[in-house]
Every structure is written in structure tokens, then in C-alpha cells.
Image (cartoon, grey):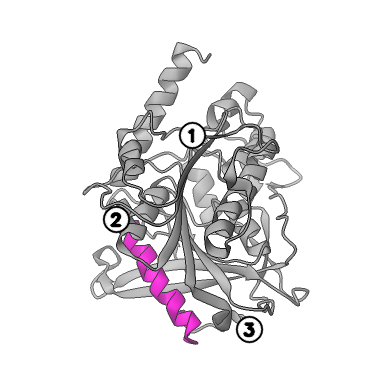
Amino acid sequence: MPSTSAIQRRMTRRRLLAAALTTGAVLPIGLAGPARSAPATGPARLTLPPPTGPYPIGTVPLHLVDRGRPNPVAGPSRYRELMVSVWYPACATGRHPLTSWLPDAPMRALLESAGFDPAVVTAPRTAGHLSAPVRPANGRLPVVVYSHGAHDHRSDTTITVQELASHGYAVVTVDHTHDAFTEFPDGRVGVPLDDPALTPWDFAADIRFVLDRIADLAAGRNPDIEQRPLPAGLGTALDTGRIGVFGWSKGGTATALAMIGDERIRAGLSIDGPMQSQPPVSGGLDRPFMMMTAEFTRDAEPSVAEFWSQLRGWRLNIQADGAIHSSYCDQQWLLPQLADVIDMPAERLTEWIGTLAPARAVRIQQAYPLAFFDLHLRRRGHLLDRPSTAFPEVRFLA
């Protein structure tokens, strides 16, 4: 059983998370540790595990501007702008370079915000080939949109995103500007701000705007504000009749809010979302919804229990033993690598990633979101029928 001090630390962190996720208040990203200069041989490059699907992956960034939402923070006559990435099964990837998990400037800002020397490590390369042609297929691809957590970025679940794309999904990941580490095509770098304090409702509005731009793509229009060339075959590959959304933390709450307000979303997945917002999440859902909980559980958070009680369609709540708030995201895999570089004590690392082994966390991140969207957007698969002997740490919560 955890010590009293460990429980107090966990409860304090959970309260801070809840406040940040509801109001958009500043929240350290949880990588705190001693800074260390890069070794003489240069910074260490972090790595990501490969996806398990049969298809190579392509990806392309898009710069979107929502002319329906003024953005006074950016100046007069400016509108809300977002960076997104589209991930998809690709072909003829040989001449298309692999992309980075984060561009250099936002990666430095991310490390500095956590108290690390930005020269210690560099971002991993992904499995995504920049602007590679879309793989021809029989029928269009189901589409999944991803919304990140507070003070984070659209790459924070790349392990899951790549897994979906390698199995035949188009996945659109969204940076929620002013609450994200991001970079625009003209070189501007965005970082999370205290003011404005974005709420889950702001995230949900971004999701709905992105759904409109996905419809533009499927209709043969290019929504990129610079009109940069799109990968061959992208528009005709998207099935706007099969759309799912998932989000981590504040993005999980935003997923619920967007789904309640937009019937285009057929299935929603929350990764440890606190379901706290003002006004609160309400209205109920009759479409499939799954929760992967860790710290924001129905027992610990009344808002999560209340949301669960409003679900009228297919629903499932799973939880992995030893998981904490970040365990279903890339941090669970990347943090141990960073800890090794800076000689972080093992007990300190355990504070931040829990006791769920990173290799097991990766398999859970790959298998369960894929199984959820396969079941509800493709009508196939049996992993979610019952607990699996292949995943003994994953419990189905009644």
C-alpha cells in the first residue's frame, strides 16, 4: 500500500490537474528534475516504438484559420488559428522523409518549461513520412480526431496515433493554440499562456471547427491557409460518415463536450479526462463512449461519475493497474529515456510514471483505442467483449 506521503502527493497533484483542466490555469508538465548539460557527444535522441499495423504511414501539417472566431490576443483583426496534422496509411514513402515528434523550437520550449537544459535530448523521429501519397484502398478511411491535454501539444499520443494510421485510419491531431507548444509555418512559436485561460469548451469549439475542415478536404478543397500542396489522394480517402474523437486529460473532457454538441461524432474515447467544465458536462449521450481512467476515476471524481451516469448508449470504463494520469500517453515511454540521460533517481521516475511498465503501457495504448474505434467505426473485433488474458493489468470497471 502507498505511504501516507505518497498518497498526499498524488492527491495534491490530482487537485492541481483538476483546476488546470477546468480553467486552463498554468500546470507544470510534470517532468521536474535536475537539469544537466548535454554530453560532449551531443544530445541523446529519444525514440518511439514502431506501430504494429501493416501499412506505412504518411503525415502532413495543415495551418487552419477560423474566421468565425476573432483572436484579440494575436492583435486586431486576427482570428483563431490552429496547427493540425493528418496521419494516414501511405504508399511510395521512400522519397518522403520521416517527421519529428516536435519541431526543434517547440521541443526546446517544452524542455525549458520543465526545468531541463534543452540541449540534453532531441525529439524522436516518428514513423510518419512527410506528404507521402495516400495508400489506395477499397473504400474510404474512417477518421479520428485527437485533442491533447492542458499545456501540452498534438504529438503527446503519437504512439496511439501511429497505431491507428498503420491499421487504416486517418487521424487528425490538433494543437489548441495558447494551450499548446506549437510552431506555425512562418516560424512563430506558440507556448501555453496563463491569459487567456482556455477551457474544455474552447477545445471543443476547435474540434468542431476541425470537423468542418475535414469535410472541406473530403469535398476536394484545401483548407490550409497557405494552400500548400496536399498529399496525393488525401481528400478522396476520408470517410466523413465514420468519425471518432479521442482526447487525453482536458482533451478527454473536450471530447465529451464536442460529442454532445455534434452528431457527426459517432464514437468518443476519453483518456483520463476529469469531465470538469463550466458550465458542466451535461446532456447525455446515446452513442458509444469509452473511458480509460487512471487518476480521474468515478470513485475519486464526482464529475466523472456523473458523466458516466448520463451515458445511454454503449459504454465501457477500463483501467490499468499501476497507471497514473500520463500513463496512456507518450510520456510513459519517453520519460524513462530522459530519466536515464539525466540520472533521475528511480523513485522520482516512479512518482511521474507510476508502476505500469512502459512496454506494457505501449501495448495498452496501441491495442485499446484501436479496438474501440474498430468496434464502433468498422464493426469488428472482440478485445472489448471482456477482460483479456493478454492484458492482465487492464480491468473492466462495472
Q: CA distance from mark 3 to mark 1?
A: 44 Å
Most frequent secondary structure within the magenta stretch? helix
Question: From which residue to which does the magenta span run?
Answer: 201-224
Q: Of helix, strand and loop, which one carries label 2? A: helix
Q: Of helix, strand and loop, which one carries label 3? A: loop
Between 238 and 190, the one lying in front of the other is: 238
Q: What is the three-letter code of the residue carrying label 3?
A: Ala
In this view of the protein, can residue 131 be seen by the observer?
A: yes
Q: Is residue 223 magenta?
A: yes
Q: Nearer the viewer, mark 2 or mark 1?
A: 1
Q: Residues within 10 Å of mark 1 (few under 14, many from 20)?
A: few
Q: Residue at x 39, y 24 (%)?
A: 11
Whichever of callouts 3 and 1 sits on the residue coming sooner in the sequence is 3
Q: Is 103 situated above or below 14?
A: below
Name the disc covering residue 232, or none: 3
Q: CA distance from mark 2 to mark 1?
A: 28 Å
Name the disc covering residue 201, or none: 2
Between 78 and 133, the one lying in front of the other is: 133
